[in-house]
Amino acid sequence: MFKNYLKIAWRNLSKNRTFSLLNILGLAVSMSVCLLIILIIADQYSFDQYHANKDRIYRVHTTRYDSNGMETASSALPLARKLREEYPIVETAVGLNKQIGGDLIYQDRYATGGGYFTESAIFDILDFTFVEGNSNTALDQPYSLVITTETKQLLFPDEPALGKVVTFHDKGILAIGVEEGNFETDYGNFTITGVLAPNPGKTHLPFTFLASQRTMLSLRNAGLFSFQDNDWANVWTNYTYILLKEGQQKVALQKALDQISGEQYEGKTTDKFAFKAISLKEITPSGFIGNTTHVSMPKMVLLILTILCLVVMLSACLNYTNLSVAQALNRFKEVGVRKVAGAGRGQIFTQFIVEAVFISLIALIFSYAILWALQNAFSGLWLNSFLDISFRQNLPLIGIFIVFSIVVGLIAGTLPAIYISAIKPISLFHRFRGVRLFKGVGAHKVLMVVQFVVALVFTISVLLLHAQARHLLNFDYGFDTQNIVTVKLYKSDNYDRFAQTSSNIAAVKEVGATSILPAGGISMGAIAMVQDNPNDSIQINYIDIDHKAVTVFELEILEGENLPKGNNKNYVLLNELAVENFQFISNEDAIGKKILLENQTVEVHGVVRDFNFLTPDRPIESLILRNRADQFAFAAIKIDARNQSKTITALEESWQQVNPNTKFVYKFLDDELLFIHTLLTDVLYVIGLLSFLAVFISCLGLLGMAAYNAKTKVKEIGVRKVLGSGVPQIIYLLSKGFIRLLFIAVVIAIPLAYNLNKTWLESFASHVSVHPGYIASGILLVLVVSFLMIFTQSYRAAMTNPAKTLRTE
């Protein structure tokens, strides 16, 4: 019997190729997006599955006492020792401190990354495989270092790492790859005591190396590191991991943590915290928490993706229903014959369900091809460089895909199967006009309007996103960003020697210094006041530069003079807005005025034209340009536009002459300033995909409804044509209802799209306006595609020969 169902399903697919293709394509496109979402969700739930004791491993989070408003993944460093020594339910506990990260140097080789200070007990809790070294003693001694295989390949590609001595320069780099500061501290020599094999799966605790916790004491004694032994107030830089004894439960651990927090923070009004036990499986995915050890999607985002998956597939299933209902009108006689021949309602129902599942499984095959393209597109997104979503598939996932496809087929095929199998044979043979599968199509009309509203909003949003991204790409910061190379100094003392040697390079036009990169997303602020009016203070931003940086960035001096040469802290430059906020009469009036700034009196030496030293999403603010050489963090080098790679090589050689033990790190300023544009581009791709999907699904639904409408009015059309109606009149008759629905969708979508896009655009200080042209273009695009869908079905019905449609009358 099942074989016969499949045969009939295949015959119907072959006979009605156009409808079959539309059904398969609609399901395949929607299904591919859903499969991508399933892969993303599966990836986020795949973290830390390889640990043998994963059911007994916990991390301690911190919350504000008696408050659920703040939660961080970190905790107090003494907590691990207290749990280990005083609570029998704990098999072992260990603390990690994240304040180490920088360059590991061996001869002329570098490896850069972040890690943690910790103890050998970490290897009793989390599963790490040692390629070299002993896990029991690897982190027992000061200045011991355990590195990953990737780090070993960089430093010791052709020789064992165990016992080798490396020099470590700390630069404030975190284990997750975010640099905290622009400084360098020589921590001295470390001995490699272990090499770890690559993790067999994804981990929430990535790192480049682990250093012994005793090293913190040695560095403190050397005056290179600062921490307190019993500091319960610092819950920001440390993490606590716990392995419970077998048979112990989370409730007992939480009770112990409540007791400890009650003891340590009792009577305090500030720095009062509570501890929270988090099992290993709860770490990823998690809610919105601070101070995490890795980048992942929060649970809320995964929930939104899940809802999106359901909405997309539900819309696709409803469209399949519309198309199937329209096509089923051609199969009434087939169903009638089968019923007269003895087929029961259950058999007819099963036939249509099998066909729906069969189409859905075929759509699954096509969706794999689309999924491959989506995976490549998603992998190339800037956001994924942080998320590192893995799209690896295994048998359980493939099984989920197949089950998902079958469920989609069952949902999509149920409604047509119920209605068609319920119709009596006499109705099937008598007249088409007596057969209406839906007495009222109000729900379908509402669905269609909603679909087109979503499609219109998405399409208009894509046009505005593209316009805003293009606007930011060509954004005028008010200073020069082209052909400027920024080099990290790490020590301000490095600047003078490097500036002197690099200035001798022919392609170098000018070398200046700055404390932060203008428009790079970082700002420094202070309270300032005019000396003559100390009671009237303002909040002001400041950047430290030398006099050459004014030339490098081509800042326009409107009044007064540039900063003096040399390290002169007593003179500053103001921007125009600062002049206004200090209530000086004019730019000229500001020259020579004394300003109190951070317990120092400085004199205004010049006024520069306003420029955007913040990010493009923020308005211009008051700014003081200072000249303190000990604050310089970057060299800003203006170079010739030709042969830039050759110039970079020369700059690196110049750097190595004066800083042989520090890695040369450079970036082009214009590339640095593209991060917001890059983020917007990623959002544009995602919204663009959703927009295409919304338009595609809406048009399929429209096509189904138009086809259904034409089928149910086939005899009416024949009668009208016999009575003299022309093709345009027939097309208008069949189209007017849909056109009315489309214009209702347009009326709803215009204010919705306007307000939604106006809201997000206003988060940028510099932005494009929601011009009527963008709205009109979005509407026109969707309407043209929609009218084509309606016209094809209406024209096809209008051109039908009435002799064929009325021959049984």
Image (cartoon, grey):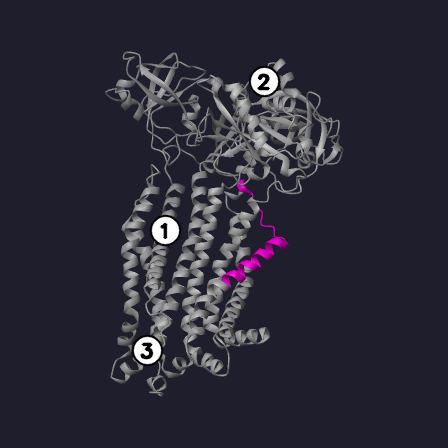
Instruction: Please tell me how crowded label 3 is: few (under 14), some (14-19), or many (20+) other residues with Cα within 10 Å.
Output: many
Where on the picture, by quarter, is residue 122? top right
Q: Give the structural element (helix, strand or loop) at label 3.
A: helix
In this view, the residue in front, 706 or 518, is 706
Q: Which range is magenta?
A: 385-409
* Amino acid identity at mark 2: Phe
Between label 1 and label 3, give the one nearer the viewer. 3
Q: Which residue is mark 3?
A: 798
Sequence-wise, the earlier of marks 1 and 3 is 1
* Amino acid identity at mark 3: Ala
**Residue 295 in view here:** yes
Height in image: 688 above or below 126? below
Q: Give the structural element (helix, strand or loop) at label 2.
A: loop
Height in image: 422 above or below 487? below
Between label 2 and label 1, give the one nearer the viewer. 2
Q: Which residue is mark 2?
A: 225
Where on the picture, by quarter, is residue 19? bottom left
Q: Which residue is mark 1?
A: 463
